[in-house]
Amino acid sequence: MNKIATICPYCGCGCGLYLHVENNTIVGVSPVRNHLVNKGSLCVKSWNCFEFVHHPDRLKYPLIKEKNGAFRRASWDEALRLVAARLLEIRKSSGPDSISIVSSAKSTNEENYVMMKFARAVIGTNNIDHCARLCHSSTVGGLADSFGSGAMTNSINEIVHAKLLFVIGSNTTEQHPMIGMHMLDAVDRGAVLIVADPRKTQIAGLAQFHLRHRPGTDVALLNGIMNVIIDDRLVDIPFVKRRTEKFDSFRALITKYPPEAVERITGVSAQDIKKVARLYATEKKAMLFYSMGITQHTTGVDNVCACANLTMLTGHIGLPMTGLNPLRGQNNVQGACDMGALPNVYSGYQEIRDPKSRKKFEMAWKVKLPRDPGLTLMEMFNGVLKGDTKALYIMGENPAVSNPDVTHTVNALKKLDFLVVQDIFLSDTAEYAHVVLPAATFAEKDGTFTNTERRVQKISAAIEPVGESKPDWEIICALSREMGYDLNYRATHEIMEEIALLTPIYRGILHHRLEGDSGLQWPCPSATHPGTPFLHRKKFAKGFGTFMPVDYVPPAEMPDSEFPFILTTGRTCFHYHTRTMSRRTSTLERECPECLIEINPSDADSLQIKHMNVVRVSSRRGVLTGRVYITENTPGGVVFMPFHFGEAPVNMLTNPALDPSAKIPEYKVCAVRIELIK
Ligand SMILES: Nc1nc2c(c(=O)[nH]1)N[C@H]1C(S)=C(S)[C@@H](COP(=O)(O)OP(=O)(O)OC[C@H]3O[C@@H](n4cnc5c(=O)[nH]c(N)nc54)[C@H](O)[C@@H]3O)O[C@H]1N2
Ligand SMILES: Nc1nc2c(c(=O)[nH]1)N[C@H]1C(S)=C(S)[C@@H](COP(=O)(O)OP(=O)(O)OC[C@H]3O[C@@H](n4cnc5c(=O)[nH]c(N)nc54)[C@H](O)[C@@H]3O)O[C@H]1N2
Ligand code: SF4
Ligand SMILES: [Mo]
């Protein structure tokens, strides 16, 4: 049996594992013992991460849709020729910006780089985006304004040495289990754990303080905490003076948020706000963590800026065991952003609007590049319905289940002149495609993933690609050549060499430096640089850190007499997103076979609903049915549903209202009605 060291394909923790291979078949998994993140452990998804790889449903050859709507098997030659011809035709008749590209946070850095080069150099459009838009675009935007860099500031292996952990809007032990493990180790060593979450998650149950605020009231809560810190003279004045700007206007705004007023907005007692403020401000080794509870709001950027303000006010940034730590979701969502699979930047966040950057990429790629930022993910689908977007190329994403208000998305998918889906399975989205291209999984390819703490790690092929599937980068290169642009690499290390050459934060990151158990954390500006465990050490990436005064604004859609409940959506620990992989994994499916609607006992009582009764949930956008799970973990007035299940598509209900600058949808709050089905 061979043991191949690689990285888990699920979440952004980036755990190291071995795939055990016999006769080109993966027969088992085991953790890398010395890995800095998982230290010899794995979570349940990862222990079972080889089952989907060999699942009979894997796409094994290209498919072309026939006139009668059925797919037929095609050769690679035929499929690529068709895709190239259709894309060239559409570009000729409607211009390059009538084509949009969705890249993938499940694919490698090398593949995302190749995809963004394909969009910009081959198609000639900046219309490229990916699921980070639905996830941490508020972080990328908000932290660019506050600090100048939108990434997790500190490292996972610092957590155990911290003395205080403040976790806001992150269900860490379920969604980032191995980071959760470090947090619980810290608590065992005496660290104080504070959790702010409307739901009583597992980690909230383990916290000394659980602030159970109303969904969408984070700005008020954080402003209230900062009001106490200023009032009690707990501000780190030397830090604020030396390292930050615009403190005065910020302080003026914070006076509007005394804890008693904040109690009325959030439902958290003034007493608790004061206690938490004092604890956080006075402990030097205090780390702040957040995730989707902060970002997925129409005020996502404001929420992120409020978190950044708190770290600057207390000087809890730029040192080990401090910082502002957005937990990135997908295995390679950090990398997909780093590689410029975004409409406004090339790799390494180099602005396309900056003539110097554009010139550099034009010289390297030997083509003229488009100047204006492209469409964001939701704008692409709106563009289809408006008639501006004619073709979509979707690699490794399943918007027919994951977008908000999916009815709108599905209408757009149906209306497209041409849809290509490149996936490992025939996903819900792929059903609408004109051409489906079979991609190889993480276990069948080489390259790198960048985890949430900016750690770039090597993945290695354990087996040959299943059927005729190919690694994403090979497919895109072959398609480019078919379209007349010579995109050609012999292996993924050559792609990384090009990335390093053009991307200052990745300059020293080359495959041969990533052997071993720890990879390299960017920024890594030279071939001898050891990587950067924490950011903003002596100065912020943008020079001074900026206090951004942000006021509390309620969510876009609040409950009323017609739709009296707040629906908040998210995840469970046994399933992953649109379930393409986790439902094809018997252990995970066994543990969580159906979508349950979580409701508080008092609400269930008043609606005369019993445990496991079937209810109808409706919002202004759609209706679904499902069984209820009565639990105190969900607060009164709020129902919770995971978005994993195509059978109970919660995104038929969610509100597509967007944060005005980050364009992230408000997945965490919309108004619904619940009715018992007799
Ligand atoms: N098992 C599993 N793991 C995953 C994933 C998965 O699908 N399954 N997905 C990965 C991805 S891409 C991501 S982005 C991460 C997401 O990881 P998380 O962000 O931890 O997961 P979510 O369930 O989306 O939401 C987090 C928490 O926000 C809380 N919340 C809801 N509304 C509010 C609010 O207004 N304020 C605050 N403060 N909190 C609120 C919810 O109660 C929930 O506990 O998980 C990653 N890991
Ligand atoms: N209601 C609600 N909706 C949400 C959220 C929420 O909290 N609530 N969260 C949002 C967030 S944070 C996220 S990140 C998105 C996720 O949304 P998506 O990215 O659309 O969801 P996934 O199911 O992860 O889709 C990944 C696809 O890639 C395929 N795949 C896996 N590996 C590979 C590969 O190597 N190559 C290729 N080509 N394909 C591959 C999988 O089969 C799958 O179809 O969902 C968002 N939607
Ligand atoms: S914590 Fe995340 S990266 Fe680690 S094993 Fe679990 S799913 Fe994989
Ligand atoms: Mo995500």
Image: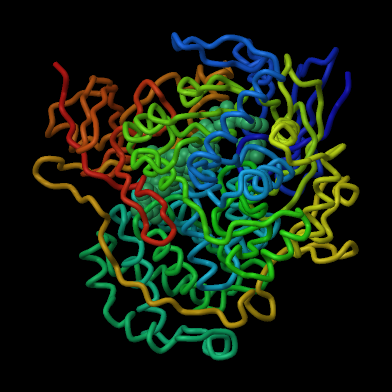
Residue 32 occupies which quadrant of the picture? top right
Does 644 appear above or below 247? above
Does 624 appear above or below 360? above
Report the residue at 24% width, 36% height from top: 621
Question: Along the line of sight, which residue is nearer the eye, 482 or 607?
Answer: 482
Residue 431 seen in the figure: yes
Q: Position of residue 466 (x, y in %)?
A: 73, 17
Position of the C terminus by quadrant: top left
Does 345 appear above or below 568? below
Residue 174 seen in the figure: no
Give the side of residue 446 with respect to residue 421, left or right: right
Position of the N terminus by quadrant: top right
Figure colour scheme? rainbow
Give the side of residue 351 with respect to residue 262, left or right: right
Report the residue at 67% width, 49% height from top: 121
Q: How many marks?
A: 0
Question: Along the line of sight, which residue is nearer the eye, 479 or 593?
Answer: 479
Question: Along the line of sight, which residue is nearer the eye, 324 or 509?
Answer: 509
Q: Position of residue 331 (x, y in %)?
A: 63, 41
Q: Position of residue 669 (x, y in %)?
A: 30, 47
Q: Position of residue 34 (x, y in %)?
A: 81, 44
Residue, far left: 561
Does 306 appear above or below 567? below
Report the residue at 81% width, 52% height from top: 498
Residue, far front: 93
Question: Along the line of sight, which residue is nearer the eye, 276 or 61?
Answer: 61
Give the side of residue 472 with respect to residue 626, left or right: right
